[in-house]
Amino acid sequence: MESSNDTLASVPMDVFEQCISPFFDDLSVVALATSCQKYAYLFFANTVYSRHLWSTLCTRRWQCIQFNVPDSLENNYWLEEYRRRFATDVESWNLMKEMKDIRVLGHHNEELYSRFVAHGMDAMDVFQRTKGLLDWQLEAMPEAVEKGLIRFHLCQKFRSSASFDSDVQLENGAMWIVQYLTARRFSADTADEPESFSGIQYFVESELDALAKGLLQRLRWTVGVKEGRQAGTHQEFPLRLVLEEMKYFFDKDHEDQQKPGKHVRPFSGNNSNYYSYHNSLIHSVLATRRGIPITLAIIYSAIVRRATGVQMRAVNLPGHFMIAASVDNEDNEQGSELLFVDAFHEGKILNESQVHSMITSAYDIPWDPKYLSNVPKTAVWKRIAMNLANSADLLPELAASTTSLILMGFNHNGTYDRRGQTGLLSLIHEADYS
């Protein structure tokens, strides 16, 4: 009688690849590979099929992870990634079993906590799947661990996005700040929970996309372009026209022409409650349509970029925050001029001399050309965090988190040294238990 191994070995490869392997889990793959040399080669050799198989197994098993796939896969990236993450899962599970039992004289074991949290999102999946299997001696520990994983992960993202050539946008960092402060309920299926990690991201992204779509509709109607392309396809429009159309979204008194599209409630500066911490949280500003200059400017630039592809730049003026872009001169002369947008004041458009006059007269300080120099993204995000720290109504439970973000999320030399990492973990630990 033919053995099961002989039967499997006789299955044609194309049939196996299309009809059998898509239903395999990782244990089945390993078990079959140890029983048949033919399949061992297929699974572990650096082939197109092997890469597809292990990429499927990785994304199926670690749903909390966003995989950054390199351009070149010659070294069988997915198999090595699976092995690495599997080893991290084992280590994380062992650390979890140790953490759940330790409570010495009311002191939480910071070393174990730090070792676990240092894995960031690499440990989130195994934590989510197994935290309910453990009898935690300290009820607050699971929530604190989850917050620590999220916060360490976000600090890494802030640090890796510090360079000028990073493709991370300002609204991403503003959203990370909100996620850092809330830091709870991370899972792949919580987009319908507004205050969850993924819910915040879903809300911010969808709101900005909807606003960009509205701007694109208005621009197309104005220039007589037929509908046919989605928002974000970077169709070119005169930038002066774009800035004028943006007043519809930021000036409640703007005399609007009858144009297609749903009416949009305009954004405005929150003069009546300027120092509320809600003005610094991008998801709150998108919901209430009221904010301070920096958050309104970030939202403004995000709408413009998503609709037209134009990248406006941050202008970190003293006492005020604006955005700017170079615009071709309206006359026949060559060259361009720098136009500024004050999103806090109805999207007002200013030239350089007007900005110069505004700063010197409003704040009684001498003008310095460096005010117009390029601003690192992290400097913008740190200014948001500093505004939060100085808010009049910042909740006590958010104060420690804001402090840890300012100290370790933005003050760095671009690398993690051992002392810096230990300090970050300690601050996160203190914030979670304060």
Image (cartoon, rainbow, N blue to C red):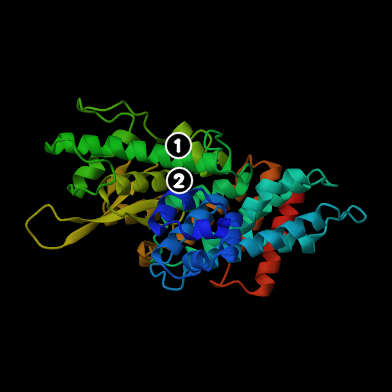
Q: Secondary structure at mark 1?
A: helix
* Residue drawn where x is 14% and y is 36% of the image: 226
Circle 2: is it few (<14), some (14-19), or many (20+) Cα within 10 Å?
many
- Of residues 73 and 270, the one nearer the viewer is 73
Q: Position of residue 21 (x, y in %)?
A: 48, 53
**Does residue 373 appear left or right of residue 174 in this picture?**
left
Q: CA distance from mark 2 to mark 1?
A: 9 Å
The kind of residue on which mark 2 rests is Thr
The quadrant of the rendering that contains the N terminus is bottom right
- Of residues 96 and 133, the one nearer the viewer is 133
The kind of residue on which mark 1 rests is Leu
Q: Position of residue 305 (x, y in %)?
A: 31, 49
Say if residue 101 shows up in the picture.
yes
- Residue at the far left in the pictured view: 332
Say if residue 434 shows up in the picture.
no
Tell me, for residue 295, which label it has, or none. Answer: 2
The residue tagged 1 is 286
* Residue drawn where x is 11% and y is 36% of the image: 224
Q: Nearer the viewer, mark 2 or mark 1?
A: 1
Q: Position of residue 187 (x, y in %)?
A: 59, 43
**Does residue 284 appear left or right of residue 89 in this picture?**
left
